[in-house]
């Protein structure tokens, strides 16, 4: 675990991480819109009152807001400044967003999350090229009495898949196992030339998040090597694409486990937790911080693809419906959907913030003061 960083480092690291991620996301929207001839009125990093900004020769106001929790691009003919969505009040200007065909609007909105995934791929590719990639799933040792030992897994075995998911590296093994404490799952093991699937009942261990403790799955194996292999540009990029895909799959897996009640919703972190983790990553060094930026970028891209109104995915859903019906969703239906989406996001923001405060021990301290 990382040491607790000082407050000043937490603040600087959070801004240094969120600012570029939001910029890349909004730049994805902006560049594709510009390619399709859509004008942009405002490009904002952060919300609220403008701290500073400038207007370029095309009339776009570039600015930084005082609340660094997001950003937006407001296009010509787009009355909703919180997203890249079309509205019923479209103008007849040739550079109007709302006046473009639905497929162009779809691609403009999709470009934001895609930019976040591309950023993660670029970071991982650079990491694999200059630092090296973990390219082994060979067991180095098996803890006596562990779940792996009970299943007959031996040193030298290769763990090909766990719970139906490919595990080419120990990072993948760890990510899948941690989400399944005390579960019985299939593990595909290669012993020499023989490939077999064995049921493994995982053990569990506790880990501490602030003042809270949670259960995590435990297999009881270690990797055969800790060295990394530097890859060429093509192999590094291909490996980064696969790694990003598996990280995204891990996010989906975590959400599924949470819905099934196997992972506590209390593990969801909000902006305060992200800020603390950013500070820990910065304290651990530039490589750890860069890996964290890539991970948060994947999360940002994935979350924005969820079909929730107010997010990019909500707009994409409306555009898909419009393409099928050959007419837009009614303004009233969109209005109510956006209100519901806003309520959901605000509720999630409140819930995760309360979780963050709980993990920092705030509620325990208040209870001790009251008691």
Image (cartoon, rainbow, N blue to C red):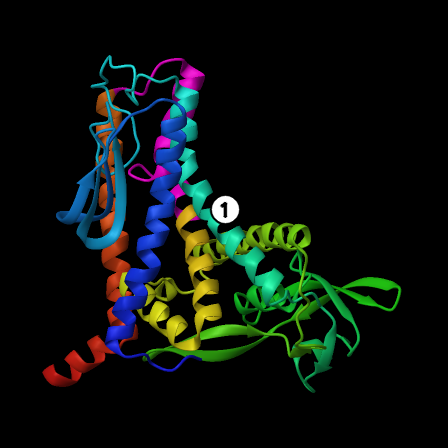
Q: Residue at x 25, y 53 (%)?
A: 69
Height in image: 270 above or below 72? below
Q: In which quarter of the image is the N terminus?
A: bottom left
Residue placed most toward the observer, 197 or 26 = 26
Is 7 above or below relative to 309?
A: below
Magenta: main secondary structure: helix
Circle 1 is placed at which residue position?
A: 118
Residue 118 shown left or right of residue 33 in the figure = right
Give the answer, above or below, for where 12 lies relative to 39. below
**Is 140 on the left-hand or right-hand side of 211?**
right
Number of residues whose C-alpha sits closer than 10 Å to that of mark 1, classed few (under 14), some (14–19) or many (20 or more): many
Q: Is mark 1 on a helix, strand or loop?
A: helix
Q: What stretch is highlighted in magenta?
A: 302-330
Q: Residue furthest front?
A: 57
Give the total number of marks visible in the rendering. 1
* Residue 32 x, y percent position in the rendering: 41, 31
Note whether residue 270 is visible: no
Q: In which quarter of the image is the C terminus?
A: bottom left
Observer-nearest of 261 and 54: 54
Residue 20 image point, x, y percent: 35, 53
Left or right placement of residue 262 versus residue 358 in this view: right
For this view, does 311 lie left or right of residue 185? Answer: left
Name the quadrant containing residue 263: bottom left
- View extreme (bottom): residue: 144
Q: Nearer the viewer, residue 50 or 135?
A: 50
Which residue is found at the position 33% from the left and 40% from the top?
311
**Residue at (67%, 78%) from the top-left corner?**
221
Can residue 354 be seen? yes
x and y percent of residue 8 in the render? 24, 74
Q: Does the magenta stretch include residue 175?
A: no
Find residue 80 and report its horizontal and vertical position in percent. Answer: 22, 32
């Amino acid at each position: 675990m990382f040491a607790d960083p000082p407050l000043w480092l937490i603040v600087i690291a959070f801004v240094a991480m969120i600012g570029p991620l939001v910029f890349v996301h909004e730049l994805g929207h902006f560049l594709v819109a510009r390619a399709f001839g859509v004008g942009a009125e405002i490009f904002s990093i952060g919300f609220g009152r403008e701290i500073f900004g400038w207007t370029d020769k095309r009339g776009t106001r570039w600015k930084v807001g005082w609340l660094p929790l997001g950003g937006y691009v407001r296009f010509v003919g787009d009355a909703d400044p919180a997203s890249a969505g079309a509205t019923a009040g479209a103008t007849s200007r040739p550079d109007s967003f709302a006046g473009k065909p639905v497929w162009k609007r779809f691609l403009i909105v999709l470009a934001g999350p895609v930019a976040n995934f591309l950023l993660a791929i670029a970071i991982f590719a650079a990491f694999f090229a200059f630092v090296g990639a973990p390219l082994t799933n060979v067991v180095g040792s098996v803890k006596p009495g562990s779940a792996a030992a009970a299943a007959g897994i031996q040193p030298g075995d290769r763990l090909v898949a766990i719970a139906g998911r490919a595990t080419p590296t120990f990072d993948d093994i760890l990510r899948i196992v941690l989400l399944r404490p005390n579960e019985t799952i299939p593990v595909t093991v290669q012993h020499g030339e023989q490939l077999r699937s064995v049921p493994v009942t995982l053990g569990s261990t506790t880990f501490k998040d602030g003042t809270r403790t949670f259960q995590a799955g435990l297999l009881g194996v270690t990797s055969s090597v800790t060295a990394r292999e530097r890859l060429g540009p093509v192999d590094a990029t291909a490996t980064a694409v696969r790694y990003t895909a598996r990280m995204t799959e891990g996010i989906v897996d975590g959400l599924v486990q949470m819905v099934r009640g196997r992972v506590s919703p209390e593990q969801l972190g909000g902006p305060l937790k992200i800020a603390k983790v950013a500070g820990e990553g910065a304290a651990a060094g530039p490589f750890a911080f860069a890996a964290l930026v890539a991970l948060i970028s994947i999360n940002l891209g994935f979350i924005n693809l969820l079909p929730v109104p107010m997010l990019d995915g909500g707009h994409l859903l409306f555009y898909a419906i419009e393409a099928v019906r050959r007419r837009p969703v009614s303004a009233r239906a969109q209005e109510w959907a956006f209100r519901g989406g806003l309520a959901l996001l605000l509720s999630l923001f409140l819930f995760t913030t309360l979780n963050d405060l709980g993990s920092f021990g705030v509620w325990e301290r208040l209870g001790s003061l009251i008691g």
